[in-house]
Amino acid sequence: MAKNEYNASSITVLEGLEPVRRRPGMYIGDTDVRGLHHMVWEIVDNAVDEAANGYADKIDVTIHLDGSLTVTDNGRGMPVDIHPGTQVPGIELIFTKLHAGGKFDGKSYSYAGGLHGVGASVVNALSRWLVAESIRDGKRYRIEFESPEDEEGNVRSGVLKRKLRVVGRDVPGHGSSVTFMPDDRVFNTIHFDFNTIQNKLRELAFLNAGLTITFRDERKTDGENAFVYSYKNGLIDYMKFFHQGKKVLYEEPILIAGESDGIRLTAAIQHTDGYSETILSYVNNIRTTEGGTHETGFKTALTKVFNAAAREIGVLKDKDDNYIGEDLREGITVILLGKMKEAQFEGQTKTKLGNISVRTAVETIVTDQLGRYTQNRSNQAVVKAALEKAKAARGVREATKKANDLARQKNSLEVTALVGKFAASIGRDFSKNEMFIVEGDSAGGSAKQGRDRNFQAILPLRGKPVNSEKRRLEALLANEEIRSIITALGTGVGRDFNIANLRYDKVIILADADQDGAHIRALLLTFFYRYMKELILEGHVYIGMPPLYRVERKSDGKVWFAYDDAECEKVTAQFEKSSAYTISRYKGLGEMNPELLWETTMNPAHRTLIRVGIEDAAEAENMVTVLMGDDAARRQDYIFAHADFNKVDNFAKKVRV
Ligand code: 1YM
């Protein structure tokens, strides 16, 4: 396609918007908060594409008081000329016709040119109304859509309300803008979440060096309500941001870039003095939480290159074995950004790159470029620091292997933990068994009394589990809370983890709905994520939801339980104005007696459980990185920015089961 010549006939016209209303999930994933925000990402994506193609360098996102949202860019402006086949302006087609491909049907889509703008019609279909503007050739054009309902209640989705017209002349510059109001007849909630959007926009700014993204929230009345994200040095800036408050082994992150077999790769690498390994990978600006072929190719090359360097420098002698990948990746953070056509996403959450050829392509690029880096004399100090870290990691690995082998012979993990506090279930049908990990002894006591012992086991946590972020697995095993969990689950841990030995189908974390509880949840999820990932991937981990409010109607003593503020409002809204009621807020699990805990939180017939997905775990990990890092000032910032943490728990976004 010619770069700056738009030709409206190049749009593939497929069908109208009815299918989108009929099955929204197919197009945006779900109709909860996640799907709602997908609407924003679709429009932002189009603006980012325009920037990635070199036509725009500014994007503005604004949440308005009425709950609608605007995205603006300074690109070429959406095409307004008439499409010869249909006699309809290009901009109208963009919003009214469903185009080929979609992100949720597992099919491919392209990053440059080809399917540009496919999501815009989906957003229109799922909006109450949408207004799009294009500034081109000194004129401002506007077109408006709506989704009206007839007498029988049938909705026509995203139909034209006012056709394309010129609303301004002698307008300087060029660009596009889209404002939409998500449809509350489609979504369970239409409230845009400030933090979700802020984090995503910041991430996009990191991934697209030189792009300036401004975010405004007109609903915010106190403090700052406009934020500007702009990073000249892209992934390098991202790495520095990610490593704030951590001790790094060398100041400047390693940056490599290259192209092979249709994939463009940029990667930043930096080691810290910590023990965990973090790989933040992206394909076409989409986070690949579950990894995939690009990560595999990267790891293979990294191991190869650093081992070669170790031999060259003499850190490894002829008689020595190579370092294993894990030695070389201890304390590492890698940010990988791939750009390619026809990316294939697989896995539970469609966040795993599947294209087979990418593995070798990435391996080639990294072997080549990282090899060049390590061979450059001026980088010797960096290479040596990384190799020294690997050497220490290997030392500990070999020493603890010996100790572990001994311990395993004595079966010591079995006997030492679990004395007294663990209450096992009677039933032996593992597929029905549940284990509650309960915050605090007093809540643990209530849970023990309230449970159905036929299938429910209780593990009370006395203190906080240690932070998996700051310790090697070997050291974690010294922590009583962690050992109890491992022993009770029966699976082993880390490299020895075997899901076939799992004794409980559901592992339910039950913590208070306050900051401490959130902390404990994050610590546990981080531990599972790092050392028992399959447990999360296969959907065995849940968050239990104790009610936040108890509402009692005075007239007849009838009682309702509400699990969040919105639900509480819903309950009270159904009462007549005159009827009196009392609301009490539970301060913690410890306040509930065994019967109440059973009825509201543990009884499968009435309770609400949230299944943890890999994204929550990754989110928890990020949170732990910030909250548990060594930098107190940054922690303060974070807590301040998430001051509503208590109420808007990130996990509450999940689908309830
Ligand atoms: C606020 C969201 O959508 N910007 C945007 C979209 C397009 C263009 C420019 C554009 C693309 C092309 C030619 C091209 C779109 N064009 C299309 C389609 N911002 C936002 N900015 N001229 C302008 O790809 O050739 C879809 S989106 F289909 F017409 F090409």
Image (cartoon, helix red, strand yellow):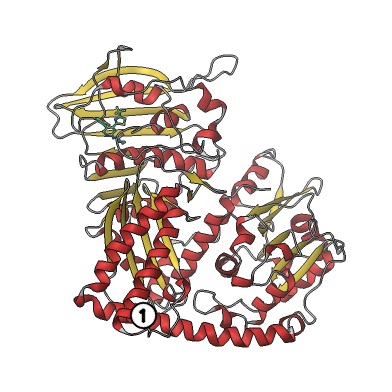
Tell me the quarter of the picture where residue 456 sits. bottom right
Asked if residue 531 shows in the view, the reply is yes
Residue in view at x 51 percent, y 21 percent: 18
Tell me the quarter of the picture where residue 517 sits. bottom right
Q: Is residue 594 above or below residue 177?
A: below
Coordinates of residue 307 in the picture (x, y in percent): 37, 75
Residue in view at x 79 percent, y 45 percent: 555
Circle 1: element type: helix
Q: Residues within 10 Å of mark 1 (few under 14, many from 20)?
A: many
Tell me the quarter of the picture where residue 452 sits. bottom right
Specify the amino acid type for callout 1: Leu
Coordinates of residue 191 in the picture (x, y in percent): 48, 43
Coordinates of residue 249 in the picture (x, y in percent): 33, 79
Of residue 584 and residue 444, the one placed in the foreground of this image is: 444
Q: Is residue 595 above or below residue 350?
A: below
Residue in view at x 30 percent, y 60 percent: 235
Q: Quadrant of ligand 1?
A: top left
Of residue 275 and residue 436, the one placed in the foreground of this image is: 275
Asked if residue 440 shows in the view, the reply is no
Of residue 236 and residue 405, the one placed in the foreground of this image is: 405
Q: Outermost residue, front direction? A: 318
The verdict on label 1 being within 8 Å of ligand 1 is no
Classify residue 352 as left or right of residue 268: right
Coordinates of residue 196 in the picture (x, y in percent): 44, 51
Q: Mark 1 — residue?
A: 387
Q: Quadrant of the N terminus?
A: top left
Q: Is residue 594 above or below residue 261?
A: below
